[in-house]
Every structure is written in structure tokens, then in C-alpha cells.
Amino acid sequence: MGGIRARRKAERPGEILEAAFEEFVLKGFAATRLEDVAARAGVTKGTIYFYFESKETLFASTVRELSKPTHAALAEEESDRSADIQAYLQAYLNRLYRFIVDDQRSREILRLLIAEAGRFPELVDEHCRACMDPVIERLRVRLQDETAHGRIRPVSLPEAAEVVLGPALALNILLLMFANRRPLDAEKFIAAHLDLVLHGLLPGS
């Protein structure tokens, strides 16, 4: 019996974070009540305070903990560095877009961060450093190398990497705003993005 209780106690913070995530997504930070989080998690409000000192702490912990799989996935380099720039960009953007289209949780966390950026600016900065900066930096380094060897037109760095990745963020926001209410062909969106990028970067294109 003691082992079961210890296991349940160890699992409880994660269950509270999952419940908090559902409530924050459904109602936003301001309208979320800890009583509702407690009810969804099947615990008392006092139990939440045992692990998290305030609603602000709970929100920040929810974003940090539930973002860890996203950060880990985006930190991995799966594109072939030896591939030519066209093959590299195609693999790079396809992987990024597949992640955006398939991972609804990461989109909802982005929605929360955008909505609460004024209240939690340090949390937004932290998320950007862990999630967006590695993606941008890898692309910046590759573009810098391609430019130095004359394989693409000279581009302004590091801004060029952010411009190349801009449409991916746009698709993320479109999916957040409209979900299934405004049909969007993700495959055609990706193909159009890749075509525009390549024709903008390759010399003589």
C-alpha cells in the first residue's frame, strides 16, 4: 500500500500540470480558477498549493514542463548536412512543417505564450531561447556557409534565417486561429514556401 501511495504522490504534480494545461487552454490565464484545476485533477485546491505556490507559478511550470518534449525534438539535427542546399532545405522545412501540423499541444502552448506575453515576458524569452533559437541558428549557419561558397546569393544574416522560417510561424498561427473552419492544404503551403525560398536564394533563379 505504501508503494502505491508513494507512486501516486510522485505522479500528482504531472497530473496537476495536465489539468492546468486543459484549463488554461480552455479559459485563458485570467479566467482559470485553481478550484477548477483541482477538480479536473481530482485533488484539493490545497494540494495544488503544496506543489505550486500560486497560479502564476502553476502557469509557468505548465508551460515549462509540457514544452520539454518540443524543445528536445527541435534541438535534434536530422537534416543531412552533406546534402546540397535544395535537398537540405526541403528536408529541413518538411520536418519543421510536419512538427507544426502534427503537434497540437505545441501550438496550444504557443497560443498561451502569445496571449500572456505581457504578463510572462521572461517565460516567453525562455521559450524562444529553448525552442526557436536553435532552429534559427542551425539554418543561419547553413546559409552562411552556402553564401561563403557562392552556392546561394549573398543574403543578410541572421535576418535571412528568420525570414525563411517566417511562413512556418504563419502556418502555426493560421492553424491556431481557424483549426478546421478554414481548410488549408498544408502540403501545397509547404511546396509553395520551398519554391519561393529556393528561387529567392539560388543564383540565376
Image (tube, helix red, strand yellow):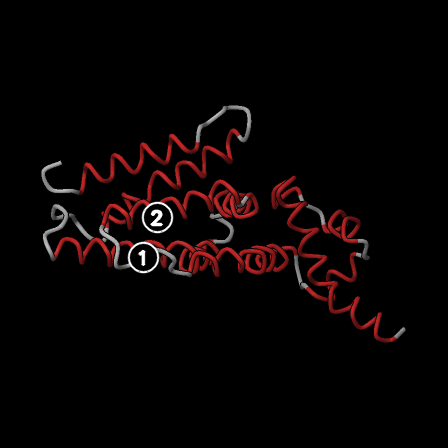
- Label 2–label 1 contact, CB within 8 A: yes
Mark identifier at residue 80 = 1
User: Could you tell me the amino acid type at mark 2?
Assistant: Ala
Q: Secondary structure at mark 2?
A: helix
Q: Where residue 125 sits in the image (x, y, percent)?
A: 42, 57
**Left or right of 104: which side holds 78?**
left
Residue at image position (53%, 45%) is 103
Q: Residue furthest right?
A: 1
Against 112, is 121 above or below? below
Against 131, is 86 above or below? above
Q: Where residue 121 sits in the image (x, y, percent)?
A: 45, 54
Residue at image position (45%, 32%) is 174
Q: Nearer the viewer, residue 184 or 114?
A: 184
Q: Where residue 88 sits in the image (x, y, percent)?
A: 29, 50
User: Could you tell me the amino acid type at mark 1?
Assistant: Asp
Against 154, is 50 above or below? below
Q: Where residue 8 sits in the image (x, y, percent)?
A: 79, 66
Mark identifier at residue 70 = none
Residue 56 appears in which quarter of the rendering?
A: bottom right
**Left or right of 203: which side holds 60?**
right
Q: Residues within 10 Å of mark 1 (few under 14, many from 20)?
A: few
Q: Residue furthest top?
A: 182
| Distance between the alpha carbons at the discs numbered 2 and 1 | 8 Å
Residue 32 appears in which quarter of the rendering?
A: top right
- On the image, numbered disc 2 is attached to which residue? 91
Q: Residues within 10 Å of mark 2 (few under 14, many from 20)?
A: some
Residue at image position (81%, 57%) is 43
